């Protein structure tokens, strides 16, 4: 039985989906892990990106088998032409430069002002279990 939070239905491509607003409304003290991946090709039902096809089983297994219940979501960033577009919301609003990306989001209080803090694993780093463990165990608070 997986211990991860079930994926929520999110419309992150909506112009109203500001990163700061989304995270402030979503985070309740615990970090949120979002795994950004290529969308599945309609003809193959597989992600179009070979790096995502390699990393996804490793990341999914890691979060499924983790002893703690972690807030974990997988988000598809679009098919290849959508992802490559300069105005892709995940590039412009969420700051992604490559996929797969596993991002850890948390709220920090910096001198009375709440800010969103982010740590990321990108591309091949997502396949390294030691790096996944380090991302989960890192507690900057």
Image (cartoon, rainbow, N blue to C red):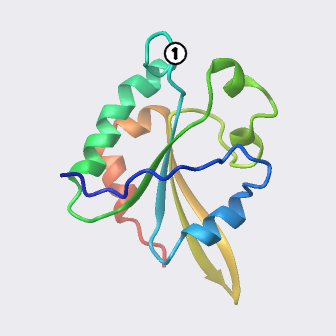
How far across and down, in percent of the image, does residue 59 sit? Answer: 34, 41
Which one is in front, 40 or 105?
40
User: Position of 67 compared to 55: left or right?
Assistant: left
- Classify 10 Å Cα crowding around label 1: few (below 14), some (14-19), many (20 and above): few
Q: Is residue 65 shown above or below 141?
A: above
Q: Is residue 134 shown above or below 57?
A: below
User: Position of 43 compared to 13: left or right?
Assistant: left
**Which residue occupies 62% across, 71% down?**
25
How far across and down, in percent of the image, does residue 131 sit? Answer: 36, 48
Which one is in front, 141 or 64?
64
How far across and down, in percent of the image, does residue 98 sit? Answer: 60, 33
Q: Residue furthest top?
A: 43
Q: Is residue 34 shown above or below 97?
A: below
**Which residue occupies 38% across, 54% down?**
6
How far across and down, in percent of the image, does residue 33 sit? Answer: 46, 56
Which residue is under mark 1? 42
**Which residue occupies 35% across, 62% down?**
70
Q: Residue furthest bottom?
A: 112
User: Position of 26 compared to 61: left or right?
Assistant: right
């Amino acid at each position: 039985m997986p211990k991860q939070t079930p994926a929520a239905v999110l419309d992150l491509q909506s112009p109203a989906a500001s990163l700061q607003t989304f995270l402030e409304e979503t985070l309740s003290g615990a970090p949120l892990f979002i795994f950004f991946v290529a969308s599945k090709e309609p003809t193959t039902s597989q992600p179009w990106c070979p790096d995502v096809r390699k990393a996804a089983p490793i990341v999914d297994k890691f979060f499924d088998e983790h002893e703690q219940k972690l807030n974990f979501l997988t988000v598809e960033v679009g098919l290849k032409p959508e992802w490559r577009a300069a105005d892709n919301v995940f590039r412009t609003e969420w700051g992604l430069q490559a996929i797969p990306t596993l991002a850890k989001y948390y709220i920090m209080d910096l001198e009375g002002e709440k800010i969103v803090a982010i740590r990321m694993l990108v591309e091949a780093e997502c396949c390294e279990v030691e790096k996944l463990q380090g991302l989960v165990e890192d507690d900057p608070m």
